[in-house]
Image (cartoon, rainbow, N blue to C red):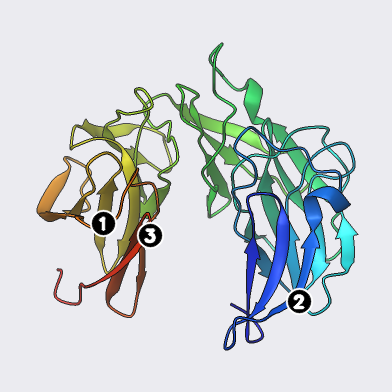
Amino acid sequence: LADGAAFVISGAGEVVRVNAATGEITWSKNAKTTFGGQVGPWGTAESPLIVDGKVIYTPAGNQTAMAALDMKSGETVWKSPSLNDKSAYVSPILIKHGEKALIVGVTSQYIFAVSPETGDLAWTFNYGKESAPKRGGTINCCSPIYYDGGLFVSSGYNHVGVMLTLAETGPPSVAWTSPDLDIHHGGAVLVEGLLYGSNWINNRQGNWVCVDWKTGETRFEKTWQTKGSVVAADGMLYCYDEKQGNVALVTPSSKTFDVVSSFKVTLGTQQHWCHPTISDGRLYLRHGDALMAFDIQGAR
């Protein structure tokens, strides 16, 4: 939401501005066609990033890697150089490294950063080649996590998680890799110097893992249901298993996966793949066509 509007990117790469009060479409632009986008087999799976009046989208392909549309009109503001790659399934993030703001994006093979003002490439890193398995390893679904000059990226399929150390200028360097935290599509959270997420054993199975942010040391790998998504709030973790829809309240710990309580989602159909969201003391979950809100103000 921005400027009284909601911005949406469809699975076909159509970027739409919608009046948040009325639902009326203000403008719509087929950005995939406009920028010659090249997507993977599951189409576009990216949330828009709003930066300084611009809507950011990652069409990839041989014309550009990332493009910016004017928030009010939908017209093109800039497009970055091409990386000649397909898009991933990742939402870009805005970071501030030193005194410089950067938009970090992901394509099938690359992690890259561009200037929010011009779209000029600041650096690229070929993540696809970093200890990638012979099969898989480039189906990126998780947005990177940035903190204190470090950028963590992961993609599942036995493709190692990588911590990049950003430089003042030029490409980043590899600080450490983690074969234990190869996140499929459930994301990760950073809490007091520790990364929490679930890894990939196969498409239906994974364990829950804690890794030290600075060293990459695995603090634990524990079984709970199966892999899934995670969000953190008020000093606690909320973990949502993708197979059966169990939701756990977990105490962050460097020693074990400490489940305080849990319940099971009973509404909706198909896979439990949607990430939980927390706002104003409520936990929001979507499963298929069912949207649920849970009061968690007493969850401590």
Q: Residue at x 64, y 25 (%)?
A: 128
Q: Which mark is residue 53?
A: 2
Q: Earlier in the sequence, mark 3 or mark 2?
A: 2
Q: Secondary structure at mark 2?
A: loop
* Residue 61 percent coordinates (x, y): 82, 38
Q: Secondary structure at mark 1?
A: strand
Say which quadrant the C terminus sits in.
Answer: bottom left
Q: Residue at x 64, y 41 (%)?
A: 43
Q: Amino acid at mark 2?
A: Gly
Q: Earlier in the sequence, mark 1 or mark 3?
A: 1
* Residue 18 percent coordinates (x, y): 65, 77
Say which quadrant the N terminus sits in.
Answer: bottom right
For residue 93, side relative to residue 243 (left or right): right
- In which image quadrant can residue 236 be found? bottom left
Q: Which mark is residue 289?
A: 3
Name the front one of labels 2 and 1: 2
Q: Residue at x 19, y 55 (%)?
A: 266
The residues bearing labels 1 and 3 have C-alpha atoms spaced at a distance of 25 Å
For residue 77, side relative to residue 135 (left or right): right
Name the front one of labels 1 and 3: 3
Q: List the residue tagged with mark 1.
A: 237
* Residue 39 percent coordinates (x, y): 71, 38
Task: In the rendered view, tell whether residue 43 sits above or below residue 23.
Answer: above
Mark 3, other Cα within 10 Å: few <14 / some 14–19 / many ≥20? few
Task: In the rendered view, tell whether residue 82 sits above or below residue 20.
Answer: above
From the viewer's side, name the closer residue of 70 and 125. Answer: 70
The residues bearing labels 3 and 2 have C-alpha atoms spaced at a distance of 32 Å
* Residue 272 percent coordinates (x, y): 33, 47
Which residue occupies the extreme top position in the image?
134
Q: Amino acid at mark 3?
A: Asp
